[in-house]
Amino acid sequence: MSDTAVRHFSLSNALFGRRLATTEAPHQTIGKAIGLAVFASDALSSVAYATQEILIILSVAGTAFLGLSIPIALIIVGLLAIVTISYRQTIYAYPGGGGAYIVAHDNLGDAPALTAGAALLTDYILTVAVSISSGVAQIASAFPALFPWRVEIALLLIALITIVNLRGVKESGQAFAIPTYFFVVSILAMLMVGFWQQSTGQLGVVNSRETFAELAQPLTIFLLLKAFASGCTALTGVEAISNGITAFKEPRSRNAAQTLIAMSTLLGVMFIGITVLANRVHVVAGEGVQETVISQIARTLYGVSPFYYATIAATTVILIMAANTSYADFPRLGALIAADGFLPRQLTHRGRRLVFSWGIVVLALAASLLVIVFQAETTRLIPLYAIGVFLSFTLSQAGMVRRWQRAGKLHPNEEVEVHGAILRYDPHWRIKQAVNAFGAMMTFIVMIIFAIAKFSDGAYIVIIVIPALVFLFLRIHHHYQRVATILARGSTWPSLRNYPIKTLVLVDDVHAGTVRTINFVKSLRQPWTAVHVEIDPAKTARVRQKWQERIGDEAYLKVLASPYRELIGPVHQYIEDLLSELDEGYIHVIVGHLAMPTLTGQALHQNAAIALSLALQDIKRVAVTTVAYQLEDEG
């Protein structure tokens, strides 16, 4: 191996880690402590902006109504409890992974499952864009000079978290565990200090660096619903643990369920605490205010001190890490949908670190595009957020209602397999069905509220995108079915026999690589013809001369005229003409290819062999063989 190649592989190992064998997959599972870092960072991080989004909406009616954020937050936490209990049941019912796509597919059919899948994939992409953008907003709050660079910083962070996740779930979890708990401790400490200062009469109020013009619109039911919908972004990410049960160590369901309860408890406490404290210190919230609520609270409690910067740093890191939840779940969900034939099969392939690398890359590219289009502004991205996740909540819980109905019809100790999942009789099926039915009803109502309240702010985009994705899934599935049908149609299979072969060798120039190609052709012991496309008459004359000097009469050199300097067109037409003269049999086209030791070196050459292979693959009875000549190989 060359020194260049060694350096290339060393860089790959440094960035992505050594390759893992398939047999090492069981050792890549994680425990509850790391599981909380991997799957709960999205939900926990939402406390950094959920309260802020409620206050921004209420501020339209005037600062006098900001106190309504507290009852709104309490209602949202009640909804969180309902969703948590519902998903806890799903985790135990589907120990192999109980995301909305699987539950809907098993119990409701393809259309609801694809709708849930499209909703979740959309939401995961938005999670990355929103979390990273919000994290950058925290940085800009502490360092306002960086505000104009927010898009560039966001894209850099997406690239960084993509590389970390390409190293594997276990390594990304270990990398993010300490920052997750640092954030939890920082926020809980901030709340304790805040309420202690309030109880002792030492709590100050925000000395705002910014002002904004109050619009003083009337407080309407619609405005309250809009504030409620904005705050419901705090629930995004709750479903992540049920999607990623297989990543946990045994007993998977119990570990996943305990992690879910821990996550929801922390989320509820921090969300209520931040909302109450924001009102006590009279934060400034409104359109155009750049400093975040967390920054204002921490600055009021600590001043511009190391504790303030530690809180901002912890919040920024958790917001960036919230994207990690999507990186854990998007590739898994994409692989499930692809395995069912509704997405490209490449998404099912595991990369060097046993992760679904294609899914990770697709997620990174899609989120980067959103960051660029919406200029990394959280408030502009929030209206697109949460509709997908509440739609998936609803479909998942509706699927569980159907599942409990089926379980109730079984006899005690009876087991049946439904789409690969074991269904057993449960004596408490009616209670569990009622819990999931109530959860489905509540999340459906929230979804409708969100869609109506946020429609004109951009929610219509998601309402259009989800059906478009479902249509795309169905078209991909139709393609795979059509290909499978054609390949399996035995009556049209060709008969097994020997056919005549006409061999063509494409010659661009005469050199050592050409000799290697000709030696390969001669080894086939078939008649052959050399073909040269005349792009430059002067070069053609030189090729003829070198052919005569070095190759001689080994084969006839056919020159194809190309008045428009095309390479593929004349070859394509020549082969078509030969096929019209050849009643049956094949044309074997052999192309030489200079193989460079590096990608940059390869890019400096025409690489015509690749283009020719792609261009000729649509012609029946034509086979293309590429003979590589390694530049360092003198054999």
Image (spheres, rainbow, N blue to C red):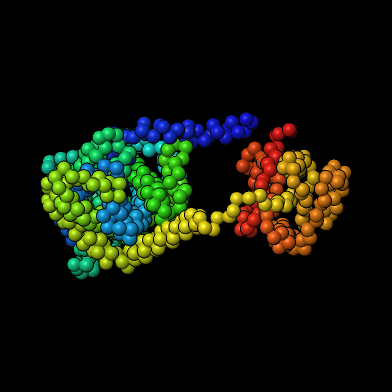
Q: Residue at x 26, y 47 (%)?
A: 417
Callout count: 0
Q: Position of residue 548 (x, y in %)?
A: 87, 46
Res 169 seen here: yes
Residue sitting nearer the eye, 591 or 190: 591
Quarter in which the N terminus is drawn: top right
* Horizontal arrangement in the rendering, residue 84 relative to residue 135 (left or right): left
In this rendering, is residue 635 above or below 404? above
Residue sitting nearer the eye, 111 or 373: 111
In this rendering, is residue 2 above or below 97? above
Q: Position of residue 561 (x, y in %)?
A: 79, 60
Res 67 seen here: no
Q: Residue at x 59, y 53 (%)?
A: 495
Q: Residue at x 24, y 37 (%)?
A: 255
Q: Residue at x 50, y 33 (%)?
A: 13
* Horizontal arrangement in the rendering, residue 538 relative to residue 143 (left or right): right
Q: Position of residue 298 (x, y in %)?
A: 26, 44
Quarter in which the C terminus is drawn: top right
The image quadrant of residue 215 is bottom left
Q: Position of residue 60 (x, y in %)?
A: 25, 64
* Horizontal arrangement in the rendering, residue 99 relative to residue 568 (left or right): left
